[in-house]
Image (spheres, rainbow, N blue to C red):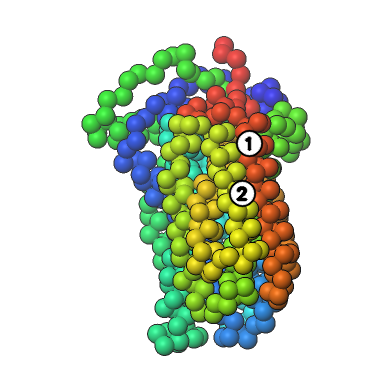
Amino acid sequence: MASAAATQNQQPVVSLIPARMDRLPWTRFHWTVVLGLGVSWILDGLEIELVASAGFQKTLHMSAEEVALTGTVYLIGQVVGALVFGRMADRLGRKRFFIITLAIYLIGSGVAGLSFAVWFLYLFRFIAGLGIGGEYTAINSAIDEIIPSHYRGRVDIAINGTYWGGAALGAFGNVFLLNPDVVPVDWGWRIGFFIGPALGLIIIYLRRHIPESPRWQLMHGHADEAEQNVDRIEAEVRAEGHDLKDVPSERAITVTPTKSIPFRQVAAVFLKKYPRRTMVAFVMMVTQSFLYNAIFFTYALVLQNFYGTSPSSTQYFFFPFAIGNLIGPLVLGPLFDTIGRRKMIFGTYALAGIVLAFSAVLFNAGALTATTQTVLWCICFFFASAGASAAYLTVSENFPQELRGQAISYFFAIGQIAGAIAPAIFGALIGDGSSREPLTIGYFFGAGMMVFGGLIALFFAFDSERKSLEDISDPLSKVSAP
């Protein structure tokens, strides 16, 4: 594959940049990367919760179907944004797109708060989705290429899990913003749409000081700039009092830089060179997305139809659900770097499925209350959240550097499509709440999917913990040393 990628008639470059990046200790620079880039998932969780609460329904005189379509338009925007910006980030660099995509989101979300008609709201929800979809590809790529290999798993998993911090923030804000006794009905939801852009404006400042991925620069003909960036990072690390040992010359990599990979070769990488990895990524993304969307978008219906909770109290039941999802990746994330990827993915997927199946038995027997149902969901998604975050990590680190952004975008799109089907299926199973058996079957099906996904990872995934990205997958531009 290297000869096909090296079509730009450039001279081979021998470099220690990947090894130098991976041997760095954890420093202030890495915290800046995490804070500056990791906000994307917080913003996405915030946006989903704002749309799910539908405070704009009365102001814009929307039907239930039109409200539901608002979420669909946002998800479609995410898929389009991921596919478009994923390839562009691979061709033109990570940094310019983690600035551009955030700016697109800021415009889309902020202007949506000024909506005066349904079509106007749809348009800018789509634009906000474009930005967040692009964020997923550019940010995941940059984080995995910058964070040292010893910390890559826990950092990536923890950052992906912060989605639920954003959702909890949105729910907390809605308690006040959607209370007509506190904020007028026509203004509360508009203010909610401004929360994300306010956070984003602060983050743009941080991102301006995060360098382009040195790995991307090396593989795309900017070796001198890559060396300068790594030199600056190492200077900052030494200024903090860390002693950096020289990297052995045998850890050098030789590449012939390339500018773009044609679609024919992209398909060949996924289907011919790495079919096993493609299968694992596909199964992991589809199973976790189906489960998440099935439960998340119908939890309010379950509480109201089967436990008699009021719509106004749903936000309070959501908080522990969100916190369980947030804590799981933070607590379990380090184990993906020590116990290992395959074992932890299997464990988190399987335990999530087992807890869900156990809750299905109790649910069908009528042995649960709204509180105990929520507790079991919290336990289930404590594990599922870490596993779902690991799915994104698996996609990002298991494919060549030149295709990392595109790999994320393709599997993200596949996961979103599978996830979009789940709420409709589970909504039909819930019905009017007169029978528990259909939903019980649905819970068993979701549990089985998660256990199946865990087994696929256990037997077919790779042990990529604490390994350099270049050791997991050769860059397409890699050549034999001269």
Horizontal side of residue 445 vs 111, given as left or right: right
Residue drawn 45% across the image and 87% down it: 180
Residue 99, image x and y in percent? Answer: 48, 52
Mark 1 and mark 2 residues within 8 Å of each other at the beta carbon: no
Residue 409, image x and y in percent? Answer: 64, 47
Local crowd at mark 2 within 10 Å, few (<14), some, or many (≥20)? many
Answer above or below: position of 436 versus 283: below
Which image quadrant for residue 117? bottom right
Kind of residue sitting beneath label 1: Ala
Earlier in the chain: of badge 1 and badge 2, it is: 2
Residue 229 in sight from this viewpoint: yes
Answer above or below: position of 153 versus 98: above
Question: Which one is closest to the eye, mark 1 or mark 2?
Answer: 2
Answer above or below: position of 260 versus 166: above
Which image quadrant for residue 254? top right
Local crowd at mark 1 within 10 Å, few (<14), some, or many (≥20)? many
Secondary structure state at the residue bearing disc 2: helix
The circle drawn on residue 353 is 2
Residue drawn 71% across the image and 75% down it: 434
Kind of residue sitting beneath label 2: Gly
Residue 113, image x and y in percent? Answer: 51, 75
Name the residue nearer the viewer: 382 or 181.
Answer: 382
Q: Which residue is mark 1?
A: 457
Secondary structure state at the residue bearing disc 1: helix
Residue drawn 59% across the image and 38% down it: 346
Name the residue nearer the viewer: 342 or 93.
Answer: 342
Horizontal side of residue 14 vs 279, given as left or right: left
